[in-house]
Amino acid sequence: MRLVTYSLDGETLVGKTDGQGIARLSDRLDAPIPDMVALINAWDHVAKAVRGIDRYDQPLAGVRLHAPVMRPGKIFAIGLNYADHVAEASMEKPRDQIWFTKAVTSVNGPYDPIERPRVSVELDYEAELVVVIGKRCRHVSEADAARVIFGYCVGNDVSVRDWQRRTSQYVLGKSFDTHAPFGPWIVTADAADPANLPIRSLVNGEIRQQSNTRHLIFNCAAQIAHLSQAMTLEPGDILFTGTPGGVGVAMKPPRFLAPGDLVRVEIDGLGAIENGVVMEPATPDL
Ligand code: ZN
């Protein structure tokens, strides 16, 4: 099942899609569904009703899709989680999971522009499988981790490399506005196998990254088990699960993104997101 957040006539809505049309869910269930987090929270109650909906009267092409979770409580991302990416970064294979956050203000829609910052030209892409948490949980074992996953999306962990590497903390280089596009929808957990998903990125049609999520060093279950030792995970929290080799900064010479470029990330079975690169616009007056 595929679930979307979209806007139509000035309203932001939640729906179910078959890839062609959308069935509006926001006011069709017996619980109010103002946003995707509300739907996830109500899921045990409403899943059966949502599953039964099979009329998609709003054409998908007529709406604007947003990131499925527009305002996650938190966004975590893991570094150096594919062996070929570790090698191209000239790093050691990590013994411990390396986590950083992306600011929630970096969330971006699946087809919306990525901004090249005014303060850097080292703009780069990272194709990633994204996990959406479905249940409030703490100290989840690897064996139980699948039960707290609501679904999966396609994501791009857009990175500003000089800001990422300037200090020992990645967070600023990973947190620029517009630098966490994901979507185009959530594929619910029952409909995807996170351990075997072909993943690739393309810049202006040229394949840059090509791998499979089976090559993750720490898989989704291990990630959830590890993170939830430290903190409570909540419905709608987002995990970026790592990127394979082929990022622009590792090319010789490096090939960064520039205004006018088009970056596409595809995961077979989940869909694709596509973001054009623009210059960061002028800042509105305070
Ligand atoms: Zn990443």
Image (cartoon, rainbow, N blue to C red):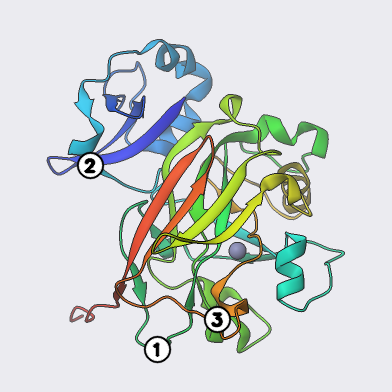
Task: Quickly name the residue at label 1.
Answer: 119
The answer to which image quadrant residue 68 occupies is top left
Where in the image, quadrant-wise, is ligand 1 located? Answer: bottom right
- Residue 164 lies, in percent from the top left, at 58, 80
Question: Which SS class for mark 3?
Answer: helix
Q: From mark 1 to mark 3, how far is it between C-alphas?
A: 12 Å
Question: Which SS class for mark 1?
Answer: loop
Q: Residues within 10 Å of mark 1 (few under 14, many from 20)?
A: few
Q: Is residue 245 left or right of residue 48?
A: right
Residue drawn at the location 33% of the way across and 26% of the way down: 32
Q: Is residue 28 left or right of residue 250?
A: left
Q: Amino acid at mark 1?
A: Val
Up-down relation of residue 174 to residue 66 (above or below): below
Task: Quickly name the residue at label 3.
Answer: 161
Ranked by sequence position, the earlier of labels 1 and 3 is 1
Residue drawn at the location 32% of the way across and 53% of the way down: 111
Task: Quickly name the residue at label 2.
Answer: 7
- Residue 203 lies, in percent from the top left, at 43, 64
- Residue 175 lies, in percent from the top left, at 49, 71
Up-down relation of residue 150 to residue 76 (above or below): above
Quadrant into which the C terminus falls: bottom left
Ranked by sequence position, the earlier of labels 1 and 2 is 2
Q: Residues within 10 Å of mark 2 (few under 14, many from 20)?
A: some
Q: Amino acid at mark 2?
A: Ser
Q: Amino acid at mark 3?
A: Arg
Up-down relation of residue 235 to residue 256 (above or below): above
Tell which of 196 and 230 is nearer to you. 196
